[in-house]
Amino acid sequence: MSAPEKGRRRSAAGSPGFLRRSQPRHGEKVIKVLLVAASLVSVATTIGIVIALIPPSMEFFRHVSFGEFISGTEWSPLFKPPHFGVLPLVGGTLMVTLIALLVAVPLGLGAAVYLSEYADPRLRSVFKPVLEVLAGIPTVVYGFFALKAITPLLKDIWPAGDGPQVFNALAAGFVMGVMIIPTIASLAEDSMSAVPHGLRDGAYALGSSRMQVSTRVVFPAALSGIVAAIVLGISRAVGETMIVAIAAGGRPNLSFNPLEGMQTMTAFIAAAGIGDLPTGSIGYQTIFAVGALLFVMTLVMNLLSIRLVRKYREVYE
Amino acid sequence: MTSDVIPRAPAAGAPETRRLKGRGTPLRERFFHLSLLASLAVGVIFLVALLAYVVVEGWPRLDSRIWSNFPDIINPANAGAQSAIMGTIWIIGFTALYCLPTGILTAIYLEEYADPLRWYNRAIEINIQNLAAVPSIVYGILGLGIISRGLGFGQTVMTAALTLSLLVLPIVIISSREAIRAVPRSIRDASLALGATQWQTVRRQVLPAAVPGMATGAILALSRAIGEAAPLLLLGGLTFITFNPTGAQSAFTVLPIQIFNWISQSRAEFTALASAAIVVLLVILLAMNSLAIWLRNRYARRW
């Protein structure tokens, strides 16, 4: 503490006026301004994303009607004549996401229930790091594994017909599902751990088994957090790029057959971005139009998830 | 759910003790327990299989060529990833420089200064939570539209580092906030009661106690940035580069993108090369994560 402050404290002994500052503290105000400025960087990021997306998208929709974009079934922006129907990309995204969820929701929730209700500390200390490592593996590595290991494996074990193509939605979706397990498991486990112990104790006292407590007391009580975890998982699956760019192929394909290759919205953005298209060209603008659609889709899910998490925090914490 | 609580036959020959029915573990309970364990086992098996696969595939190429040679599209036997490794180091260095101070200052503001009931502070908070879940490719679009072409930074190390900084900023903020929140209220109260100003309290009491937690979060955030490829694809990271970056204005490639490049080549040699580079990438990440865990255990204070 600096000298004037010490002096002030000594003189304070007799007078009640010592609480008044001897001098205004400009330093404190400067620091606060600095802190606020740093916080505004994240606000500026969001504004930057919106500014980056809107003008080129507007430009895009001057050439292509919104109706054609949102309901067209053919996507070939760089061909002649070009077609700008985004449905094949959306369909590819939804197909891969659906497969990922079929893997990640049961496994992620199973892991969460186990970690929250069954595991003793020793097992937790084994499984938790495994989930953390899974969450930390770069997605390009997942994509490599899907293309070079999972797809050939599926081909080998496929019981009938030709099996999956070299690029297919199934392998990409499966691997993506494993990738999202940690996201779903950790958020769902948080919300289950937040359920008060009194509820469990009451159920046990009434003679419930552990399975009954898990599925009929803890699970419903933590439901908003569990839904939040799943919604966040969907958002991550929709936004994931490298796995699908590597393993799901680069051909827009409106199909319900997961054994075929299909391009997702993110994979299209990546493929078009690699091409280094000139600013102002229609090809360049498609990146932003598809990006805006992707951003809006994930934004809705993220806000829903944030809201649900708040809900369970308000109830139990 | 009475059916599985009382499924047992009456306890043999001992009707008078009236044991509680449903103790022990009925089949359904065991099955449930096993299926929960199985769902964790899938993750473990997947992880082991993945690691084994990349090590086995990459083993023939896992030698000094990886870090001492440059990419070579004609002769895979000569190819290496030195320019990509150096690019990663340059970009992560700049990323740390941008995102750590900004993230930590934001965390201090939100935890120590902001009134959480004010709408604008709540808006900042929700905004950060949302940014944490915005797809990384959207950050690539931000980098492409605003930083690279709008502000004219071009396809450089600087653009890549700025983009990655914004991408991992929410992670830095969220983990720093948790570290700051873990410092008990009483420490602050004691400091303020002794006449310290708010900043003195933060600077001399809260921050020193929160540093281990913040360092752990910072390392995890940077390791996320190291593995990130998607946004850099839009920023010119896939160009064929056979030189190391010399500064912020250099063109660049990074390790994950070099891996992506090799995966896209059809010849088998490149698959081995990609595996070997993946092993290098995973070792770097593993080292960083171990450091983070060590820091957490070594310096974390229990209050």
Image (cartoon, rainbow, N blue to C red):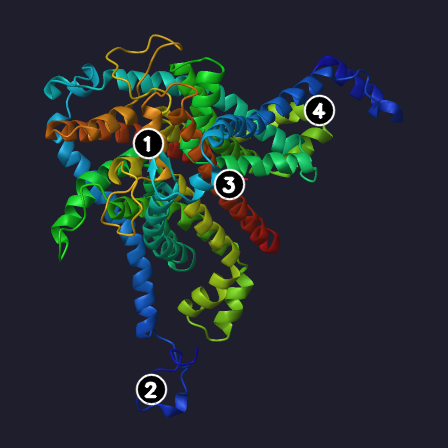
Left or right of residue A165, residue A110 in this image = right
Residue for badge 1: A81
Q: Residue at x 53, y 48 (%)?
A: A304
Mark 4 or 3, which is nearer the eye?
3
Q: Are marks 4 and 1 in contact (CB under 8 Å)?
A: no
Residue B229 visible from this viewpoint? no
Residue at image mark 4? B197
Res A129 quadrant in image: top left
Q: Chain of mark 4?
A: B
Q: Position of residue A203 (x, y in %)?
A: 50, 70
Please name the amino acid that badge 3 sits on. Leu
Mark 2, chain letter?
Answer: B
Q: Is residue A305 above or below residue A41?
A: below
**Residue A5 visible in the snapshot:** yes
Kindly indicate whether the residue at mark 3 contacts the one at mark 4 (C-beta within 8 angstroms).
no
As measured in the structure, the alpha-carbon distance from the residue carrying label 2 to the one carrying label 1 is: 80 Å
Q: Residues within 10 Å of mark 1 (few under 14, many from 20)?
A: few
